[in-house]
Amino acid sequence: MKIRRIFDFQARICFPNFDNHYDKYLESFRSTNLGLIHQVLPWPDLVKALGLKNNKEAPDSLFSLKGKIALMFLKNYTCESDKKLIEQLNGNINYQTFCDILLT
């Protein structure tokens, strides 16, 4: 067996530009189980009922108020540990959309 350089035989994967295809992606997300859950939850009512507010003195949070609640739902939905959930969140665009963030 010879050692080969990766670039000699590696196929290229061209990912579509996310910004240009966001509507298609969002439509696809909404058809998933997670997307269906996201659509039926009353996000503004939950934020209000839980009394969540942005702390002006604290550093900016990565998550919006809605995103913080969504992260709690996602934790229960996935049954993952905190560490595993963060790993999944970093690489799963559906989880990011559910939590109202986009990590680039």
Image (spheres, grey):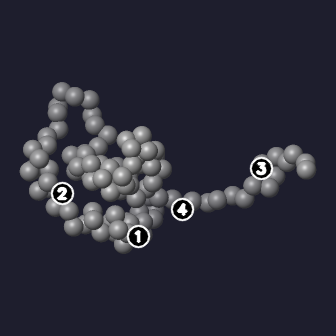
User: Looking at the picture, which amino acid does disc 4 mark?
Assistant: Pro
Q: Secondary structure at mark 4?
A: loop
Residue at 32% of width from left, 57% of height from top? 77
Spatial separation of the CA atoms under disc 1 and disc 3: 33 Å
Q: Which callout, 1 or 3, points at the residue further toward the start of the chain?
A: 3
- Residue 90, how many percent across, how many down? 45, 46
Which label was assigned to residue 16? 4
**Horizontally, is 90 left or right of 66 in the view?**
right
User: Looking at the picture, which amino acid does disc 1 mark?
Assistant: Ser
> Which circle, 2 or 4, is nearer the viewer?
2
- Residue 36, how many percent across, how many down? 30, 69
Which label was assigned to residue 28? 1
> Which circle, 4 or 3, is nearer the viewer?
3
Q: Are marks 2 and 4 in contact (CB under 8 Å)?
A: no
User: Looking at the picture, which amino acid does disc 2 mark?
Assistant: Trp
Which label was assigned to residue 7? 3
What is the tally of numbered marks visible in this picture? Answer: 4
- Residue 89, how many percent across, how many down? 41, 48
Q: Which callout, 2 or 1, points at the residue further toward the start of the chain?
A: 1
Residue 22 picture quarter: bottom left
> Which circle, 1 or 4, is nearer the viewer?
1
Which label was assigned to residue 2? none
Q: Secondary structure at mark 1?
A: helix
